[in-house]
Image (tube, rainbow, N blue to C red):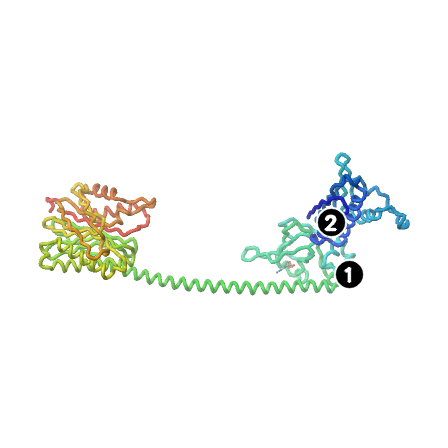
Amino acid sequence: MQRHISVFADWNAIPTLLAFSDELEADWRMPADYGYLLRMVIEEVATNIVKYGYHDHNRDQIHLSCTYDQGVLTITIRDRGQPFDPLTAPPPDLHAAADQRALGGLGIFFVREYADTLTYHHDPDSGWNELTVTKTMTMLDRLRSLPLFQAVPEAVLSALAPRLAECRLAPGEVLFHQGDTGHECYVVLSGAVEVITFVNGAELRLEVFHSGQIIGEMSLIDHSPRSATVRAIEPSRLVALNEQVFATLIGSSPALAMHMLRSIVSRVRNTNQRMIHDLERKNAELLTAYQQLQAAQAELIRYNRLEEELDVARRIQQSFLPRVLPQPPGWRIAAFSRGAQAVGGDFFDTIPLPDGRIGLIVADACGKSVTAALFVALSRSLLRATSQAAANLPHSTDNGAALLQHTIGLTNDYICREHGEANMFVTLFYGLLDPTTGRLLYANAGHNPPLRVNHDGTVVEELSEGVLPIGIVVGQTYEVRELYIAHGEKLVAFSDGITEAMNSSGELFGDERLHHVLQAHATQTANDLVITVVAAVDAFAAGAPQADDITLLVVERLPTEQA
Ligand SMILES: Nc1ncnc2c1ncn2[C@@H]1O[C@@H]2COP(=O)(O)O[C@H]2[C@H]1O
């Protein structure tokens, strides 16, 4: 510990320096006789400097610095006044009458008597005077200065003190380990030591002991091994008391015994409190953990139930897809649909009509999962029902366009009117194929344009995208277009999940790659081509999660020689 003050060397300096010394005494908790020495140095040395050190024109500063470390007080006073070596001052004539004595001599005499060392140095070049006074505590001084020993009779303390040894610890140094046999207890003179124990291999600090506290007394009292490890956390000095000294001290001072009892009782109370607190905290943690477990279990049950329900929904949805696709002579039809989630919003359908024509549907309901799936069920049923009803109309046999318009129009109006609030819509490609002629009438309600691919795999036509999806505007009309699929050609209808499939770099599969695959596998049958395209999309995504449902329908008209 070190402090410093500089003051102007006039009479105001003395009270300022004395106030500084009071502050130090309190802050450093110095024994009273150290404070006394400091005050004496200020009163005698500083007063001499103010009084005799200067002619009024050259007054300067007085610098006082003090260090107090490991029981040694060092006081240094520096000034640039007249040199005055207190060591050369003649001793006062203690027998002379008070009015005959030289002024100031007595105070300096006491300082010299009281201090352990006193050195003076004058530097003629710079003019600095430096007086250093030190005082080192004896063991007796130190014990006396501790409140713990205040009630121990002076005779006992003086008899014991010279037999006591001091031990020093560097920070981190262990005084003793838990489990050691203990023959001594210790009084902390300066610094700080911690008491630690181990819980599940981890250190737990029980207490920190400072100057004036006694440690390691438990083993002396009950002769059991050390209950904890003691380790220094600062440079520390301790005095060791063996069993005999400890017994003498306790025997000589009921107040000391009571003090120790009090500290042990308070330790028991603290331990109880801590145990209760720990138990309460652990109980609360257990309760919270139990509640979280219950909530997680409930969630798991709910999740499993949902999974089961979703599985049922998935199976129902799969059952909506035609199990066997119509294969009219000279034609091959193949399709595939895979949801991104358990249930999806894409679907395809093939509807054989009584006159031999076949309705071909690829659709994509907006949204995903259960909402989309419910909408798929509704749209698909409506399209099936209206298609079959329209096909039975007398005029419909020769008028495919009317059938298509009627079917899509009715479905659209029904969804708009009955489910408008759901804000759902479905993109739909609906083709009506006459397998005998290869004529395809179709309407497209906002779906990806299907592709007409010739025998060498070239995309020769992108079918019209058409107008709005169904479910948006009541009364919307859907234009019906016509094309012929020649021998060796294919019609490829698909959902945007194919072209918008994404790899982990965020790249899309895209139209170009699809066209390329179709071309590269021009000779494949409808069925193989479906498998090839899906495999190409999966290879491109390379494990990136499927973001959207994918659906593909390939209608192939066999070359004449095979038809
Ligand atoms: N819970 C505690 N709180 C404070 N000090 C303790 C505690 N437990 C042990 N000690 C002190 O740590 C010392 C370890 O050695 P002893 O058992 O001899 O004596 C012990 C006491 O002085």
Label total for image: 2
Mark 2 or 1, nearer chain start: 2
The quadrant where ligand 1 appears is bottom right
Specify the label residue 16 is tagged with: 2
Look at 18% across and 44% down and name the residue there: 461
Picture coordinates of residue 165, whole percent (x, y): 73, 52
Q: Would residue 163 be seen by someone viewing this image from the given angle?
A: no
In depth, the one of 219 and 135 nearer the eye is: 135
Picture coordinates of residue 170, whole percent (x, y): 65, 48
Look at 16% across and 59% down and name the residue there: 386
Badge 1 residue CB within 8 Å of ligand 1: no
In depth, the one of 392 and 197 nearer the eye is: 392
Badge 2 residue CB within 8 Å of ligand 1: no
Amino acid under disc 2: Thr
In the picture, measured across the screen, residue 202 lies left or right of residue 190, that is: left
In depth, the one of 89 and 208 nearer the eye is: 89
